[in-house]
Image (tube, rainbow, N blue to C red):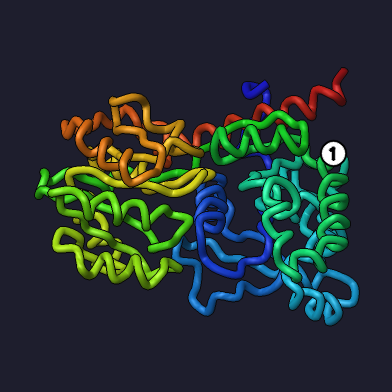
Amino acid sequence: MTDDVDIDNLDVTLAHWHVNAWGGAEYIVTKMAEALGVDAVHTIGEPDPADSNPYGDVSFVDVTSSLDYSSVRRLQQRFGRVFEYAQWEDVDWREFGGPDVLVTSGATTRAVITPDDTLHVNYCHSPPRWFYDLYHDRKSSLTGVLSRPLVRYLRMRDATLDSRVDHYLVNSPIIERRLWKFYKRESEVLYPPVELEKYRNDGDEGYYLHLGRLDEEKGVPAVVEAFSGLDEQLVMAGGMGDIDDSVRHQINAAGNIEYRGFVSEEKKLDLLANCTALVFNGRNEDFGIVPIEANASGKPVLARNEGFPGVFVDGDKNGVLHDGSPRRIRNAVKRLDTGEVSDSHTDQFSLTAFREQLIRSIQSARGSLDSRVRQ
């Protein structure tokens, strides 16, 4: 199908749900726009961050003014994503040229109703977890109980949108499984791109590295306890998160643990380039870019055997898996082979691989849609 479709002859438009912070989803849609030669992404509401897009020269354009009763719509936007399904549904894409291809990013954007000859591709970061796999996690709070009728309504709303998507892209095999579980739809894994060329290996200065916020969900308490019982240096870099004061005191009291706080991109690259290995203990991460950054720097990863890192770390070839407990983390340190990791583990995450697969995917899906007219 791809031979019959030339991406250069297609009018491609991108849409992304409301931006309330610059994060991984915004990075991915920016790179999609760059790969497809699109200079603006449509969104609902003005992005909340005061600073401009840090990931590239792609602007985010608010479509609210194109909607009826736009002043009411802006009032609705104060309630977060609750009204986004309805707002995306009311965007008339004929006013934006009736694109050949509409690539949407995020769950609520799936509500768009396109012309019948427009291909709708959705990049699914995850089905809304508070509707599905994490639904029961909020039942212990009064707010969680009171919000259940609304969540049930929004879940039904979300489920009815699935037929509007012609082709799904997902960021990892974890989301591929989750999307099939809750939507019963096949999807194609398109890994978020990593600028591999900026990483390097400057040797081993004898310290293990933990990158990321000091959060419970990142398994930080277990990492701190593990290294408190080891004769190895641990450097921790990232913002101060939600860990207990007792864990902070443990970090300060340990002679072999150094907390650097949030570091610049340049300093992060230096830390990766000179560490022995990366310690990663996040719980059931959907993707997780840090292990890839470590391998791109030629360093192995001590990864928790859950989520995407549990899939990415392949035996002892690019790291060691553990169960997230202090004892198993210590055991992983002792089992680690500190030899340099081959870049073959990270080639699939390059910007080039991302662009080529994205274009092939759109061409193939567009060809399939066109063939339904020809038959």
The answer to whether residue 319 is above or below residue 15 is above
Foreground residue among 308 and 368: 308
Quarter of the image with the C terminus is top right
Q: Say which residue appears at 67% left-offset and 23% top-offset.
A: 4
The answer to whether residue 365 is above or below residue 69 is above
Foreground residue among 215 and 116: 215
Q: Say which residue appears at 40% left-offset and 43% top-offset.
A: 324
Q: In the image, residue 50 lies at what x, y percent?
A: 53, 79
Q: Which residue position holds label 1? A: 163
Foreground residue among 273 and 282: 282
- Quadrant of the image occupied by residue 124: top right
Horizontal placement of 281 versus 68: left or right?
left
Foreground residue among 276 and 161: 276
Q: Say which residue appears at 60% left-offset and 70% top-offset.
A: 20
Q: In the image, residue 354 lies at what x, y percent?
A: 48, 38
Q: Say which residue appears at 55% left-offset and 58% top-offset.
A: 26
> Three-letter amino acid code at disc 1?
Ser
Element carrying mark 1 = helix
Q: How many marks?
A: 1
Horizontal placement of 371 versus 236: left or right?
right
The answer to whether residue 288 is above or below residue 190 is below
Q: Is residue 11 visible?
A: no
Extreme residue in the top direction:
375
For label 1, the crowd category at 10 Å Cα-Cα, with few meaning under 14, some 14 to 19 and many 20 or more, is few
Quarter of the image with the N terminus is top right
Q: In the image, residue 264 lies at what x, y percent?
A: 29, 66
Q: In the image, residue 366 lies at what x, y percent?
A: 72, 32
The answer to whether residue 60 is above or below residue 100 is below
Horizontal placement of 371 versus 138: left or right?
right
Q: Is residue 108 visible?
A: yes
